Image (spheres, rainbow, N blue to C red):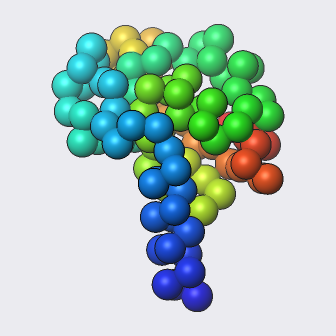
Amino acid sequence: MRVSVIASVAVSLVSGASKAADNAACWDDPTRLEISCTPTEKLLTSLKFASRQRAIKAMKAEGRPFSPNELHFIGNAKLGDAETGILNLTFRDDRVVSR
């Protein structure tokens, strides 16, 4: 079971967008794949039923997988001020079903 979960997560990561987060504006560590500088206020409603690829592209970060169906993001658009927080996306059939 553990091997299949690891394999699923690896496949999810390989099929994602870039392998570095575009977070230079607020964090400056592209290896932290879950940190995004994308403001989340309008983003949240736009992600409903979005594909995994669209969510990754919108966040400009890969996200950190919690499971094959969940991605974890840390939003830091305002450098610790408003619009900073955690965003967990749950996918079903490659579409966001919960945020």
Looking at the image, residue 25 lies above or below residue 36:
above
Q: Is residue 2 visible?
A: yes
Toward the bottom, the furthest residue is 1
- Where residue 44 sits: x, y (%)? 67, 23
Quarter the N terminus occupies: bottom right
Q: Residue at x 58, y 43 (%)?
A: 88
Quarter the C terminus occupies: top right
- Where residue 70 sits: x, y (%)? 61, 53
Q: How many marks?
A: 0
Looking at the image, residue 67 lies above or below residue 59:
below
Toward the left, the furthest residue is 28
Q: Is residue 67 visible?
A: no
Toward the front, the furthest residue is 15
Q: Residue at x 45, y 54 (%)?
A: 14
Q: Residue at x 64, y 41 (%)?
A: 52
For residue 51, which quarter of the picture? top right
- Where residue 60 sits: x, y (%)? 44, 26
